Image: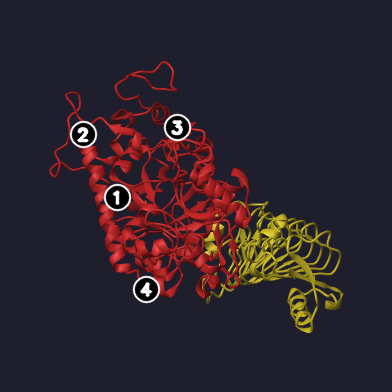
Chain colours: A yellow, B red
Amino acid sequence: MQTIDLTEIGLRETNKTLHAQSADTNQTAWEIVNPRGSHAIACGLDAPIEVTVKGSTGYYCAGMNQQATVNIHGSAGPGTGENIMSGKIVIEGDASQYLGATGHGGLIVVKGNASSRCGISMKGVNIVVQGSVGHMSAFMGQSGNLVVCGDAGDALGDSCYEARFFVRGTVKSLGADCEKKEMRPEHIDILKGLLDEAGIDADPSEFTRYGSARNLYNFDVDNAGAY
Amino acid sequence: MNKHDAKGIPHTTPRQSATFTQDINSDIRRAAATGIYDIRGGGAKRKVPSFDDLLFMGASISRYPLEGYREKCETSVTIGGLHAENPIELDIPITIAGMSFGALSGPAKEALGRGASAAGTSTTTGDGGMTPEERGHSDKLVYQYLPSRYGMNPNDLRKADAIEIVVGQGAKPGGGGMLLGQKISDRVAEMRNLPKGIDQRSACRHPDWTGPDDLEIKILELREITGWKVPIYVKVAGARPYYDTTLAIKAGADAVVLDGMQGGTAATQDVFIEHVGQPTLAIVRPAVQALQDLGMHRKVQLILSGGIRSGADVAKAMALGADAVAIGTAALIALGDNDPKWEAEYNKLGTTAGAYDDWHEGQDPAGITTQDPELMARFDPIEGGRRLRNYLKVMTLEAQTIARACGKNHLHNLEPEDLVALTMEAAAMAKVPLAGTDWYPGKPNTSY
């Protein structure tokens, strides 16, 4: 295990060290101490390494992640894991707004709650939240899955495209063009796989699926009131 | 027509309303028939105060000119030297503005890259990501980072020579993008992670930041991901140029791209294009003032766009304090957009060469703003690239001609004192005197 004291060497040196790890590096386990809520920690990683941040992080931790696993032993600031391509991010605490925004792939797990706009514009990422998510979650979600073991706030899945949402608790309200969907066996399988991968013990049959009603895919003046 | 009625009383001449013009009436009839606003491409078509309202004075007894063809007039510009390890070095201060693959065909994007590279300048991606043909044919490619983040991925980000965070564009300050279903081919759909054939409305705000404090952190993240190597531009519409420029600089931008209302878009509401935003002439001085107030003029570069058409426009933009300009619509016309040789086909589409602006419908006879394979095949990217290079060269020569006549050995040495205005509006906006007077409208107690 390699340990980096972020406060001592600074953000630039921290990220430079992590970016220098190649696909076949022997140093695959990294620990960052004293993050003190810094922004952009471990963003832009592109190697199969595991980075554990001991403490809470600011904006954009693990942004645009590829291949790497990033564990945050604390809470995570806005835009954590934005545009994640692959790999995994595990947040032990809560996540602030825009979690996994525009993410294309990979998995984000939140052990606590996630704030508003969780999974906004998601483009293939899978997000599993053990707690609840705030309002406007998965706004304009294009593809991927958002799993919420608790409740969802207002306007879930507003203007969504082909992303899927699985919520175990209540949904305060659905956004424009988002509707409740039938939970077919293939959806149970997808959900079970995601819960297993996230290490969360929950019964897939207790969840409800939501997704696009596809009424707003092509403009129709009779739907103008929905905008 | 009878000049008198049955009783011999003369008719008044039929009179068209200045308020309800034929154009306006056709808008009303169209709205009544369809129930939806008019969507089109391009920039503001209305007449606004512009660079045409400015003139250079040239040399005289008090200023002497440089010899054409003998004495050098430099045109190079470096963009992004403030924070980036590898600033962009351009031979000419005329860049190609961001236009998306999706709005434009792949070959059209290739031609932009070819032409720009041959002329020693940069081209820019758009709302749809980076295509291999564009990267391959562009020596210097600026990667736009947009609210939709369609096609956005860190591998392409690291391939870029600069990153342009798009906050707004002149045609629609505060508006998002629009790509209607008919242009969503398999390839476009795949690049944007969306089903084929649906309307794509790009967001107008970034999904993971709002406001200047967040922007500063976003710039930090992009720099960390790209190792502080490439410049980061911030593109804003001509909305509040003094404050937007100030905030972009404070957030850490290496360059500010400022786009006036004549700047084009692939598609948006006509009402948006014509009624939101400010003319390019009106926005340049406030932006330069912001740079000067922060001591950043010539350190953070100002790239001005929106209706730049000629070397005269380039020279005027630079005299008012811009470091470079960007062209979009003009580049498309150089490639062959709206060429009269397709007049018969424009007529079939209910329009005429020069007025064709339904770029979103994907039926472009010139094969540029389309994803239709048959129409695309009409466009030759090598010939298109050559035409764009020629046009860029001509604009540069024209700007040099003017600069030499003003006694300047670099385009950057042009200054507001070289200019006069033909109208009071232009004088007030450009902060130069009305021609033949020592009057600076809107600037009290100033004279030569």
Quarter of the figure with residue A34: bottom right
**Res A123 visible:** yes
How many badges with numbers are in the image?
4
Q: Secondary structure at mark 4?
A: loop
Q: Residue at x 45, y 72 (%)?
A: B372
Tell me whether circle 3 and circle 2 mark residues in contact (CB < 8 Å): no
Q: Amino acid at mark 1?
A: Ile
Q: Which residue is mark 1?
A: B92
Q: Amino acid at mark 3?
A: Gln
Q: Which residue is mark 2?
A: B407
Q: For marks 4 and 3, give the one nearer the viewer.
A: 4
Left/right placement of residue A167 relative to residue B266 reads right
Q: Residue under mark 1: which chain is it in?
A: B
Q: Secondary structure at mark 3?
A: helix
Q: For marks 1 and 4, give the one nearer the viewer.
A: 4
Sequence-wise, the earlier of marks 2 and 4 is 4
Q: Amino acid at mark 4?
A: Ala
